[in-house]
Image (spheres, rainbow, N blue to C red):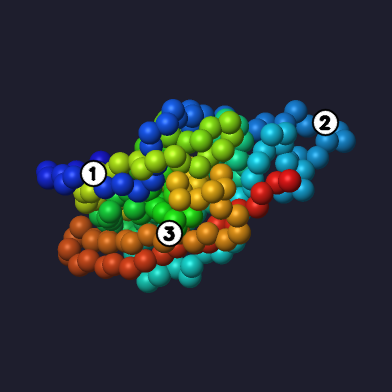
Amino acid sequence: MPSRPSRRTLLRALGAGTSTALAGCLTGYRPDTGQNELPPGPENPPMNASHHVAIESRDALPDFPVVPEIEVVEPYAMPEHPPVLRATVRNPTDEPVTIGEYRAVVFMYAHAKDRAILLPHSERVVNGTPTPTGREYPVVGDGCWRLTDHVPVTAEYGTVEVPAGGRVSALVGLYGAPEQSACLPTGNTRFTASYSIAPLTDGKRQSGRWGFALRVRRLD
């Protein structure tokens, strides 16, 4: 279980928030495929999709005892949900490790300058499958996933213990930053996270960064 710090500081603003929020429902598109029906893809998007996202590149894996991973699980921006990614940190070693900061390592609240923000769509899960929590954030609405004001986040530092051979993972949704005029920024947007890893046996700590580039395409 994550160990929370005993002291908290004032709220830190990362994204957006005074207008009415649109529910972050993660009900994905599930086509009733027939014999002659093509599955959804960048050239055959589902009805009402406004944007398509894909991983453009991932950084080379750092010399960490843990392995960060990112994948797209909902590639389309739909009226019901924004694009959604799953971030995972695996521990392939034979001993447990503690990693922090426990939100940053799964890209919760990661932001790409003034272009986009990744906001939680699930809780962190150790050795399990993260499920959507239906979180709501203040967005323009009507299928536009740009934040309208700042989403306050507590400035704290927490850690999570990942058992030997285990993993921690979470779902994050892609939102446009309130400074943007578009609902989502198109082109390549890069996200990075800082990692601090301490094996529990010897207490030796390692730190570094890892990230990825996300390609966003508007569907006309």
**Residue 81: image x %, image y %?**
55, 34
Q: Is residue 62 found left or right of 34 in the rendered image?
A: left
**Residue 107: image x %, image y %?**
40, 51
Q: Which residue is mark 2?
A: 34
Q: Which residue is mark 3?
A: 113
Amino acid type of the residue tagged 2 in the rendering: Gly
Please tell me which residue is depicted at 66% across the width and 49% down the height of the picture: 218
Please tell me which residue is depicted at 59% across the width and 34% down the height of the picture: 143
Q: Secondary structure at mark 3?
A: loop
Please tell me which residue is depicted at 78% across the width and 32% down the height of the picture: 33
Q: Earlier in the sequence, mark 3 or mark 1?
A: 1
Camera-nearest label, 3 or 2: 3
**Residue 72: image x %, image y %?**
56, 48
Residue 155 seen in this snapshot:
yes
**Residue 61: image x %, image y %?**
45, 68
Outermost residue toward the right in this view: 36
Q: Real-space Cα distance between discs 3 and 2?
A: 43 Å
Q: Earlier in the sequence, mark 3 or mark 2?
A: 2
Up-down relation of residue 199 to residue 7 (above or below): below
Please tell me which residue is depicted at 62% across the width and 42% down the height of the picture: 76
Q: Earlier in the sequence, mark 1 or mark 2?
A: 1
Q: Secondary structure at mark 2?
A: loop
Camera-nearest label, 1 or 2: 1
Whether tag 3 and tag 2 are in contact, CB under 8 A, the answer is: no
Which of the numbered marks, if any, corresponds to residue 142?
A: none
The count of marks equals: 3
Q: Is residue 32 found left or right of 191 in the rendered image?
A: right
Which of the numbered marks, if any, corresponds to residue 11?
A: 1
Up-down relation of residue 91 to residue 32 (above or below): below
